[in-house]
Amino acid sequence: SAAQTSQEEPLGGAEEHETVPAEAVPVEKFELTEDIARKAIDAFMLVEEKYPETYAYTSYEEFVAKDKAGKAFETDIKSLGFKTMGEWKAAIDTVGDTYQIISEGSDEGIETQIEQVKADKTLQQAEKDRILATLTPFIQSDNNKKIIALLLKDPIYGEKLRLLAEEE
C-alpha cells in the first residue's frame, strides 16, 4: 500500500542509495582534463602504496563500505580533489582505458566492430545492444586521447601510466 512505501522511502532518502557497486552501472563517458588525469593517477599510486588490503575486496566501493581503513581511503581520494569515490573511479578507469587504446592503437578496430554489429541483420536487437554495450566503453574521445598522449610525454606521469597499466 502507499502508506508502507512512504515509510520505507522518506523524502530525500534517494540520494543515500549509492551502494550499487560501480561495476553494475553502465560506464559513463568521462572527459578528462590534464589536472584530473594527473590527480587520478596520483590517487591510484597513493592507494596502491597505502592500502594494499584493497586487493581483498571485489571493488574499491566494497573496501570503503566494509574495511576499517575505508573512511581514511575515501578521505585521501577526496583530498586529491574528487567529490566522490565514484568520480575518481570513473576518472582512473578512463585514464586506464585511454592509455590502453593509445598503447595498443586498438580504437579503430573497435569502431569497425561496432559498425559491423550495427549492420548485422542476423542479430536480434537485444543481442546487438548487449554487444554494443560491451564495445562502447573502449571508444574514447579525442580530448581524452590528447590528454593521455600529453601525459605520456611527461617523464614522471609517463612512467606512472605504465605502472598503472601493469597493475590493472
Image (spheres, rainbow, N blue to C red):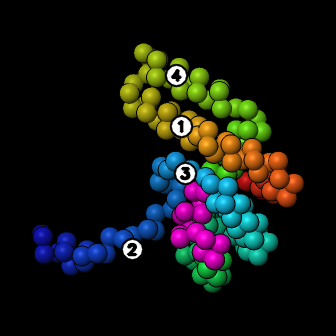
Q: Secondary structure at mark 1?
A: helix
Q: Nearer the viewer, residue 36 or 124?
A: 36
Residue 164 visible to the viewer: yes
Indicate left or right for 67 with 27 as reference: right
From the image, tell me which residue sits under label 1: 136
Q: Which residue is mark 4?
A: 115
Where is residue 110 shown, x and y percent of the image?
Answer: 61, 29
Indicate the quadrant where residue 89 lies: bottom right
Circle 1: residue type: Thr
Q: Residue at x 63, y 45 (%)?
A: 144
Q: Is residue 84 magenta?
A: yes
**SS of the residue under disc 2:** helix
- The label on residue 95 is none
Instruction: Find residue 28 and report its horizontal and vertical position in percent.
Output: 50, 50
Q: Earlier in the sequence, mark 1 or mark 3?
A: 3
Which residues, given as a range, are shown in magenta? 78-91
Q: Nearer the viewer, mark 1 or mark 3?
A: 3
The percent position of residue 104, horizontal first and vertical second, equals: 76, 35
- At label 2, the amino acid type is Glu
Q: Which residue is mark 3?
A: 30
Q: Which of disc 3 and disc 4 is earlier in sequence?
A: 3
Q: Amino acid at mark 3?
A: Phe
Judged from this view, the residue extending furthest toward the top is 121
Which is more N-terminal, label 3 or label 2?
Answer: 2
Q: Residue at x 50, y 33 (%)?
A: 131
Q: Earlier in the sequence, mark 1 or mark 2?
A: 2
